Amino acid sequence: MNKISRELIQGKRLMALDYGVSRTGVAVCDEMHIVVSLRPLINTDDMVVSRVVDQALKEGIGVIIVGVPLHHDGRVTPIIETIQHFVAALRASSPIPVVTADEAFSTQDARAMMVHSGMKKKKRQTKGVKDQVAAAVILKRVIDEASMR
């Protein structure tokens, strides 16, 4: 997995995806990479690729970022294989560049962020909320890492 360069994302609206077996969390940011916003979940079904592409085109997205949970030992798990197939299908269907980013621990970071922000336990337990926040965590990490280069 390559590091995402500042040049690739600079001045572009970005979309990050936290792909899951049932649903996919979505977050986007503005061209200046200041505001990260959550978007409604996308059901992970046979239409997920076309839904992602349609939404990205409607929102003027310049780069789509898909989180992949990498293991430090290089192991490839079934979910990683599933995400890799999704990424390949997305790249084949999208005129927008699709890149991958390490999403290791994004769900745990999302949970901690929700607790720290004061989000009520009932809201945190709502299906999909952590997927949306995890997508925002992935997006924020990419922005922060690219700005350090």
Image: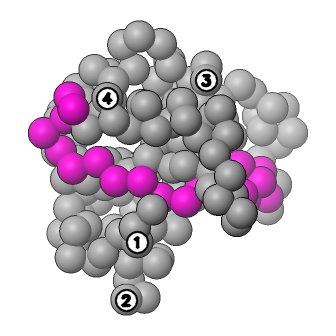
User: For the residues marked 3 and 2, what is the alpha-carbon distance in whole angstroms?
Assistant: 33 Å
Which disc number belongs to residue 89? 4
Q: Is residue 1 left or right of residue 79?
A: left
What segment carries the magenta color? 92-112
- In the rendering, at what x and y percent does residue 15 appear? 35, 48
Which disc number belongs to residue 149? 2
First in residue order: circle 3 vs circle 1: 1
Q: How many marks?
A: 4
Is 127 or 74 nearer to us in this picture?
A: 74
Report which quarter residue 117 is drawn in. Answer: bottom right
Is the residue under label 1 in contact with that under label 2 (CB below 8 Å)? yes
- In the rendering, at what x and y percent does residue 20 appear? 59, 30
Please name the residue that numbered disc 3 is placed on: 21
Please name the residue that numbered disc 1 is placed on: 3
Q: Is residue 19 left or right of residue 49?
A: right
Q: Residue furthest left?
A: 95
Q: Local crowd at mark 1 within 10 Å, few (<14), some, or many (≥20)?
A: few
Is the residue under label 4 in contact with that under label 3 (CB below 8 Å)? no
Report which quarter residue 128 is drawn in. Answer: top right
In the picture, the quarter occupied by the C terminus is bottom left
Report which quarter residue 70 is drawn in. Answer: bottom right
SS assignment at label 4 = helix
User: For the residues marked 3 and 4, what is the alpha-carbon distance in whole angstroms?
Assistant: 15 Å
Q: Local crowd at mark 2 within 10 Å, few (<14), some, or many (≥20)?
A: few
Is the residue under label 2 in contact with that under label 3 (CB below 8 Å)? no
User: For the residues marked 2 and 1, what is the alpha-carbon distance in whole angstroms?
Assistant: 10 Å
Q: Is residue 63 visible?
A: yes
First in residue order: circle 2 vs circle 1: 1
Q: Residue at x 25, y 38 (%)?
A: 91
Q: Amino acid at mark 4?
A: Ala
Q: Amino acid at mark 2?
A: Arg
